[in-house]
Image: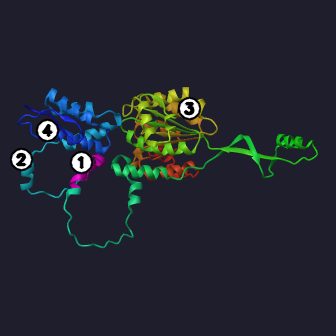
């Protein structure tokens, strides 16, 4: 009589008959790799996956992929990570092809290496971390290297792309974002506050203090204009091509929300979602989870013009006051008609003091404004910046403090047309 086995995670394996091999164990190992890479997978999900595979059988690779995806993927942002892990873990062995390749002469490959996939570093660390730890330590000669003209690890982290970071590098990036020097820009308002400097006499405060002594002693009181941080409004794209960058940038916004009073955060894909209240949670990880639960179209499509129209109609007069600064985070790849996009961008630009466009496509050398959406949006922004690494976010923090730079002028891309 066959008995059910139990894994170290507590999941119950279905009874294995002869010839099954270690297929069930491979599913358990695959779940462990996903958990190390960042997916929230418990023993119950592993048991459900084993039961589902046992019920439907093993058909094509697409059917097996869809079965495991329906059980392990619970959040939209985990889709790219699951696809990359499935490609690496369940790849075909092709032993005959490998043996022929080993016996054949190999010419040196001079082709340019393809860019790394999104989440590839995290999946590789989760799959091959144990293998590197089990390798025997080899005695190698000590080599002295002159590192005066090399880049340090901290500099490499500042220049690393958010989409290509490993899990450990993402954790270090979050700590670095929390330690950034926050902007100190302030604007003058029409209100006044008490001051000890003799700039302007405050008649009300002077008469109020004179009434305490019956008018025998009148000492002048002074006031000065009150300064406040201008409202900071963030419109972040959460479509499939932008979700990884937006998720990291939200940690920087969480720090700003703790230090500044008026920070309004909006996420948009196919619809607009206000997550300002969710970002006020003191725990950054809990704030990110609240934002994910409040948004239903994460890693989906994008409609920039339609969502900007909704923001201008419902939220513009509420949050764009007293010299507000708007940060627009998107790649500008609009699929709908660009006529509405150009109109709404012009309206948004006229409603705020500064409109800063953060585009991760600027990480590519030789970027040109060829897309229709990009050409429609560029004439209506004040600054055009990158947002793909820590160095770009640090430059943004300095720009919010009032430091201007000619390198972010959008007109230089408009001249290329």
Name the element at disc 1. helix
Is 3 on the left or on the right of 40, as rendered?
left
Whether residue 56 appears in magenta in the rendering, the answer is no
Disc sitting over residue 127 in the figure: 1
Task: Say which element carries label 3.
Answer: helix
Q: Quadrant of the N terminus?
A: top left
Pointer 2 or 1: first along the chain: 2
Dot in front, 4 or 1: 4
Q: Which residue is mark 2?
A: 96
Residue at 29% from the left image edge and 34% from the top image edge: 73
Of the two numbered discs 4 and 1 on the same chain, state the one appearing first in sequence: 4
> Does the residue at mark 1 contact the one at mark 3 (Cβ under 8 Å)?
no
In this view, the residue in front, 305 or 56, is 56
Badge 4 is on which residue? 23
Above-or-below relation of 111 to 269: below
Q: Who comes first in sequence, dot 4 or dot 2?
A: 4
Q: Which residues are magenta?
A: 112-132
- The CA distance from mark 3 to mark 4 is 59 Å
Q: Is residue 357 left or right of residue 31?
A: right
In terms of sequence position, does the residue under pointer 3 or pointer 4 come before the other?
Answer: 4
Calculate the distance from the C-alpha at mark 1 to the C-alpha at mark 3: 49 Å
Residue 32 in sight in this render: yes
Disc nearer the start of the sequence (1/3): 1
Disc 3 target residue: 347
Residue 117 position, x and y percent, is 29, 45
Quarter assignment of residue 35: top left
């Amino acid at each position: 009589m066959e008995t059910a086995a139990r894994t170290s995670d507590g999941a119950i394996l279905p009874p294995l008959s002869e010839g099954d091999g270690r297929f069930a164990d491979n599913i358990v190992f695959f779940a462990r790799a996903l958990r190390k890479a960042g997916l929230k997978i418990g023993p119950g999900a592993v048991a459900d996956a084993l039961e589902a595979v046992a019920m439907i059988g093993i058909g094509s690779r697409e059917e097996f992929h869809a079965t495991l995806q329906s059980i392990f993927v619970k959040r939209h942002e985990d889709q790219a990570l699951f696809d990359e892990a499935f490609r690496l873990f369940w790849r075909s062995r092709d032993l005959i092809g490998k043996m022929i390749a080993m016996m054949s002469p190999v010419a040196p490959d001079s082709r340019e290496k393809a860019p790394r996939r999104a989440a590839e570093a995290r999946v590789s660390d989760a799959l091959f971390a144990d293998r590197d730890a089990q390798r025997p330590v080899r005695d190698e000669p000590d080599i002295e290297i002159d590192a005066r003209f090399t880049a340090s690890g901290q500099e490499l982290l500042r220049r690393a792309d958010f989409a290509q970071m490993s899990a450990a590098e993402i954790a270090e990036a979050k700590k670095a974002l929390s330690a950034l020097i926050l902007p100190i820009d302030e604007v003058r308002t029409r209100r006044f506050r008490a001051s000890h400097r003799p700039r302007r006499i405050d008649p009300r405060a002077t008469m109020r203090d004179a009434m305490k002594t019956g008018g025998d002693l009148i000492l002048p009181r002074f006031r000065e204009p009150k300064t406040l941080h201008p409202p900071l409004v963030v419109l972040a794209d959460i479509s499939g091509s932008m979700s990884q960058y937006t998720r990291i940038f939200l940690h920087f916004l969480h720090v700003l929300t703790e230090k500044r009073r008026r920070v309004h955060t909006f996420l948009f894909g196919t619809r607009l979602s206000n997550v300002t209240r969710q970002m006020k949670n003191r725990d950054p990880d809990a704030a990110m989870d609240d934002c994910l639960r409040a948004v239903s179209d994460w890693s989906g499509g994008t409609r920039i013009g339609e969502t900007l129209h909704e923001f201008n109609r419902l939220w513009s007069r509420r949050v764009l006051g007293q010299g507000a600064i708007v940060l627009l985070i998107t790649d500008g790849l609009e699929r709908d008609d660009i006529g509405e996009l150009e109109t709404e961008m012009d309206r948004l630009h006229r409603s705020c003091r500064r409109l800063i466009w953060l585009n991760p496509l600027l990480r590519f050398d030789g970027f040109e404004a060829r897309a229709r959406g990009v050409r429609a949006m560029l004439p209506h922004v004040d600054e055009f910046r990158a947002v793909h690494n820590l160095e770009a976010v640090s430059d943004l923090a300095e720009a919010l403090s009032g430091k201007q730079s000619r390198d972010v002028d959008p007109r230089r891309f408009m001249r290329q047309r």
